[in-house]
Image (cartoon, rainbow, N blue to C red):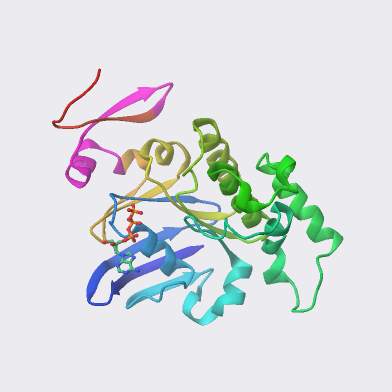
Amino acid sequence: MIIAEGIGFAYGRTPVLEGAFLEGRDGQMVGLVGPNGSGKTTFLRTLYGSLRPTAGLVTLDGDPVARLGPRRTARRVAVVAQERGGDLPVTVREMVLLGRLPHQGVFDRHSPDDHARAAAALARVGASHLADRRVDTLSGGEKQRVLIARSLTQDVRHLLLDEPTNHLDVRYQHDVLGLVAGLEVTTVVVLHDLNLAARYCDHVVLLDRGRVVASGSPGEVFTPATLEPVYGIGVTRVDVDGRLHLVFTPHDGPTKA
Ligand SMILES: Nc1ncnc2c1ncn2[C@@H]1O[C@H](COP(=O)(O)OP(=O)(O)OP(=O)(O)O)[C@@H](O)[C@H]1O
């Protein structure tokens, strides 16, 4: 369970988060959505102690993150941050094995169990064939899958993902989020694509200029009345095979069709 209450943060003197909150119950997938610059990545980083909030409290299963320290946090939370860690001159297998580090002693070598977990994680994201490739030669989508495999290898109860569908083609966007939704972990995921959030998230938190302006099920939050003032675009809800879909229509500007 992840609980964040009253989170404030400022870069220098510029406040970026004010009173932000979320609650990820066991096994839930919480979507963090909002326009560019609304504070999603900043909020996510406070959840795993990469940024220390200026106000408020984040707890993981009841323990304040600020007191856990990096190693104990890494035993509880796996993070797939944006555009990070994908350019090391190591093989995919080595990169995925890094997920085992928080569970090893300083001088430990990878055990057969570590290797088995890494191989299973690669298979799970459809990337077994990449195991011997160097990470810095992969495409954006391949890298993203490898980073997700690494987080699976970390064997944790909480998963934090910053735009994990970036670089993924339409099928893999669904494959990856479907996979994550099926894991028995508590997930907080930053997503730009509100239709993906509607499909896979149990709960969504909408940020606008550093404040939570709505929090609830996708059906509750994703209404024209809530979204239109935040994004400045027309929103229509449609039902496709019994599922909520959103169609966006710019208020003005040129169109091709
Ligand atoms: N290291 C930093 N120093 C100063 N300002 C920053 C820094 N990182 C982010 N900001 C600013 O903080 C605000 C929130 O940024 P953040 O990256 O959290 O938003 P976001 O919602 O994740 O944006 P996006 O959807 O564009 O990725 C933005 O105005 C951004 O310019």
Asked if the magenta segment contains residue 232, the reply would be: yes
* Residue 175 sits in quarter: top right
**Looking at the rendering, which quadrant does residue 240 occupy?**
top left
* Residue 37 place in picture, x, y as percent: 28, 56
Q: Residue 230 in magenta?
A: yes
Quadrant that contains the C terminus? top left
Is 68 on the left or on the right of 204, as rendered? right
Q: Is residue 74 above or below residue 206?
A: below
Q: Which one is nearer the viewer's eye here, 55 or 145?
A: 145
- Is 30 on the left or on the right of 127, as rendered? left
User: Which quarter is ligand 1 in?
Assistant: bottom left
Residue 217 relative to residue 120: left or right: left
Task: Examine the rendered structure and indicate whether residue 120 appears above or below residue 78.
Answer: above
**18 relative to 228, above or below:** below
Q: Nearer the viewer, residue 253 or 87?
A: 87
The residue shown at (71%, 64%) is 100
Identity of the residue drawn at 70% across and 46% down: 122
- Please tell me which residue lies in front, 123 or 134: 134
Q: Is 158 above or below relative to 248?
A: below
Q: Nearer the viewer, residue 157 or 179?
A: 179
Q: What span is in magenta?
A: 221-243
> How many numbered tags mark residues here?
0
* 181 left or right, relative to 132: left
x and y percentages locating residue 108 in the rendered image: 80, 74
Image location of residue 183, percent across then percent down? 61, 48
Q: Which residue is depicted at the point 45% across and 49% down?
A: 163
Is residue 183 in view from this perspective?
Answer: no
